[in-house]
Image (spheres, rainbow, N blue to C red):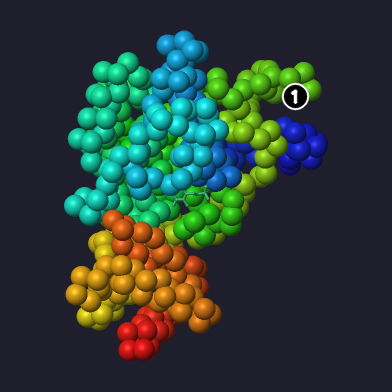
Amino acid sequence: MFGRRYCLGWVTSPAATELEMIVLDWLAKLLNLPEQFMSKGNGGGVIQGSASEAVLVVLIAARDKVLRSVGKNALEKLVVYSSDQTHSALQKACQIAGIHPENCRVLKTDSATNYALRPELLQEAVSRDLEAGLIPFFLCANVGTTSSTAVDPLAALGKIANRNEMWFHVDAAYAGSACICPEYRQYIDGVETADSFNMNAHKWFLTNFDCSLLWVKDQDSLTLALSTNPEFLKNKASQANLVVDYKDWQIPLGRRFRSLKLWMVLRLYGSETLKSYIRNHIKLAKEFEQLVSQDPNFEIVTPRIFSLVCFRLVPVKNEEKKCNNQNRELLDAVNSSGKLFISHTALSGKIVLRCAIGAPLTEEKHVKEAWKVIQEEASYLLHK
Ligand SMILES: *Cc1c(COP(=O)(O)O)cnc(C)c1O
């Protein structure tokens, strides 16, 4: 089925490539992504190893696209925009792509918008940069930030990006999976204004690492930036344009048959089971959220949207610093119990504890037990 060339590992077999296109089209449909992201026209999906690779390849595509029109010497004028909640993968991509460190605009967010990027701030920054003779060229927005699952307003941000001919990338690495449910699809409303969209099937979609799904509207931008054509790779299928050469959509040459496991997940569970899988996690997270909010020693820090609950011990008499230390101690105590693992972040200077529901075997009883452990450790801490 996969042919000798696949065995040699240097050219993806047409069968594997075709399955990847098909499976990504299926998933695009499940997410109700606009037609332009499907493989019919000039768009399409590709499986990357990680969200970090996904943002890197689109940043490079965007960089080369703008440099083709304004001239190669403009590299140091190119400006990238994102919120301060954006994953550090973007910063790394900028470092690799040669974006001037001073040209990375990290726009402030706060609790007033639940840490979502404010379009007015983006507009102000873009205008300021244009006035200074710089070239705004890339915006990365988030649906489900890593710290607190904040959702940036895609439609309003996309309008600004489109008007200024910037590449608009949407990072929905974690929360993208939830958007297959009609009641959560609203969180990617506005994705039609984006140039690229990314979701990690390996986070919350029952697919083993690695499997990061990237869709683009304009595959030519990617391939113009990433294609090479050495003699040793020349083959009839590529030269006759019979196959999609995914090597030109990614950094490595060789690639694994990752669409197979995603195909298995989709075929084995089916879309309805996948939706109830997501809904169940969100329901469990809601239950955890309720338990937390009933305890006067704790507070919910940002409203829960998906299956992540951000909470903390409340400060006594406005002693924020002491409160941060207490939350750090609680985190260590809970995690060293060996019974559960929670992580933390900082929001507006507050140390926040994060309980994420997302493991296939998690049930209601585990959530209740987890909360019991947290309460016990907290009570010990507060009374010692
Ligand atoms: C997890 C995550 C990433 C990083 O994902 P990798 O696949 O490990 O590179 C980036 N952005 C968001 C929003 C994430 O949740």
Regarding residue 217, the answer to whether it shows in the image is yes
* Vertical relation: 34 (above or below) 186: above
Regarding residue 37, the answer to whether it shows in the image is no
- At a point 64% along the width and 31% down the height, the residue shown is 247
* Vertical relation: 64 (above or below) 320: above
Tag 1: Cα neighbours inside 10 Å, few (<14), some, or many (≥20)? few
How far across and how far down the image is residue 109, in percent?
27, 47
- Tell whether circle 1 marks a residue whose Cβ is less than 8 angstroms from ligand 1: no
How far across and how far down the image is residue 192, in percent?
32, 34
Residue occupied by mark 1: 233
- At a point 19% along the width and 75% down the height, the residue shown is 317
Between 359 and 120, the one nearer to me in the picture? 120
| Quarter of the image that includes the C terminus | bottom left
Q: Quadrant for residue 127, please give it.
A: top left
Between 55 and 297, the one nearer to me in the picture? 297
**SS at badge 1:** helix
Label count reads 1
How far across and how far down the image is residue 224, in percent?
55, 20
Between 218 and 85, the one nearer to me in the picture? 85
| Quarter of the image that includes the N terminus | top right
Please indicate whether residue 242 sits to the left or right of residue 124 in the image.
right
- At a point 59% along the width and 33% down the height, the residue shown is 250
Q: Quadrant for residue 318, please give it.
A: bottom left
- At a point 35% along the width and 39% down the height, the residue shown is 106
Between 205 and 132, the one nearer to me in the picture? 132
Question: Looking at the picture, which amino acid does disc 1 mark?
Answer: Leu
How far across and how far down the image is residue 368, in percent?
38, 82
